[in-house]
Image (cartoon, rainbow, N blue to C red):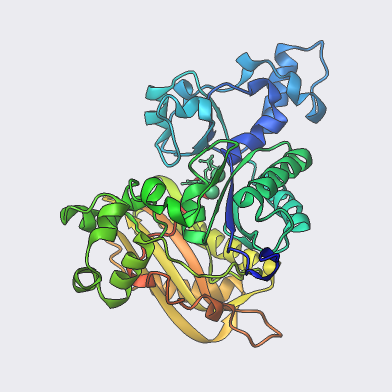
Amino acid sequence: MRVSATVTPNRRIAHLDMDAFFASVELLRYPQLKGLPLVIGGGRRREAEMFERLRQAYPDRDWGPDSLDRVPVDFFPRLKDYVGRGVATTATYAARQFGVGSAMGLMKAARLCPEAILLPVDFDEVKRLSRLFKSTIQEIAPVMQDRGVDEVYIDFTDVPGGQREGGRVLARLIQKSIFQATGLTCSIGVAPNKLIAKMASEFNKPNGISIVHPEDLKTLIWPLPCRKINGIGPKADAKLQSHGIHTIGELAAREPGWLVAHFGKSYGAWLHEAAWGRDDRPVETESEPVSMSRETTFERDLHAARDRAELGAIFTRLCEQVSADLRRKGYAGRTIGIKITYDNFEKVTRDLTIDEATDDAVAIRRHAGQCLKRVDLSRRFRLLGVRVGKLVKPGTEALPGGRYSETPTAPPRSARDRSPDDHTDLLFPELG
Ligand code: TTP
Ligand code: MG
Ligand code: MG
């Protein structure tokens, strides 16, 4: 008798994450930089300027978008020449060997790897390739959930090949197809659920596949630090550490009651489930944004009164950008908010909710301006952000945000630290 035909297939969930994404996108354009330390960050793209300099240095050659792969390596800006407050958004694996990584100040990165090449991000190209790799996946495995610019969850359970070798066969096919379509590499973790898959995709980076089965929990997951669990951020981790809990295994060993007593009913219970590798959140195919925001870190700290004109212009521009983002995606929102980071890195947010959803820059600025009046403006600040939430798609009555209400296995929002996908701060560092 064939038993396999009647057995429910094991749940196999993949998490796929592109390798050194923004940097790899630049390497497509400049293949001569492959293997060299390359850091992404700093100012805006100035391709025209580069062509001008190239024409001066090599007047006998034709310089244009088609000859980028012939730009001499010596011609690229080096980290050691960088001056400013920018941060690295990412770095190639060659640069990571020197200790350079995401969110590091570029001046600090320059001390670690002065010869690294520094290039700005090309958002248009990043977005194009992001769409391209995702559509490539969907042609093979249609149940895919967007999880940010360079990562997705994929439900392998019912896809042909999705169960073979624990998912490795399908993962290999997807890697190969993405490489053919884009020239980019990615890493994939396949596991019984999203929580473990997310951790597993990091095990064999870059260009790796890792397969985790339920019985691997103790050997592969429990030795990891608690921070590796998506949903345990720096604050929760610090608190766990203060109780002597450093690894996921140590977390799993605590009584659920103890966790609830110290971390609250919902988060405490979730911590226990997460440490035991339990997570039944589905892979959700259409993801709708909860909010849209833009923010900018200034070149120097600004003061509301003394830098009024400059700040006003930045503020207006942020509102216009959020409005344009909303319109492009067809949303309007009812909650308007602001965010400020003071010169000592203390953060405050304020928001207000209006009756009718708006996507209008002037209205957003008016309401955001009211929020701004509710914060201490006597102190200098380094970052300003504008956010529109409670989104609706005009013409439909659904509140897309509602879809995001917490599932029982997700950590409560209040207890969550900043989402790991929330890269807006670094994505838009120089917009001011
Ligand atoms: P990640 O997937 O976190 O990083 P990565 O793809 O560069 O490298 P890895 O191989 O380790 O996955 O982020 C994807 C892109 O998002 C990254 O290329 C740049 C951007 N990003 C930021 O802008 N700010 C950040 O703090 C991080 C972590 C990423
Ligand atoms: Mg990545
Ligand atoms: Mg990522």
Residue 119 versus residue 121 in the image, above or below: above
Q: Nearer the viewer, residue 168 or 103?
A: 168
Residue 375 versus residue 94 in the image, above or below: below
Residue 362 seen in render: yes
Q: Residue shown at 37%/23% (left/top)?
A: 111
Residue 242 versus residue 122 in the image, above or below: below
Query: Is 270 on the left-hand or right-hand side of 65?
Result: left
Res 286 quadrant in image: bottom right
Residue 9: x and y in percent read 63, 65
Residue 365: x and y in percent read 51, 71
Residue 431 seen in render: no
Q: Residue shown at 48%/24% (left/top)?
A: 79
Q: Nearer the viewer, residue 225 or 134?
A: 225
Q: Residue shown at 54%/31% (left/top)?
A: 92
Residue furthest left as drawn: 243
Residue 382: x and y in percent read 37, 51
Q: Nearer the viewer, residue 13 or 34?
A: 13
Q: Nearer the viewer, residue 98 or 409?
A: 409
Res 299 quadrant in image: top left
Quadrant placement of the N terminus: bottom right
Residue 229 versus residue 413 in the image, above or below: above
Residue 208: x and y in percent read 58, 38
Q: In the rendered picture of this protein, how many numbered marks are placed on residues?
A: 0
Q: Residue shown at 32%/48% (left/top)?
A: 225
Residue furthest front as drawn: 1
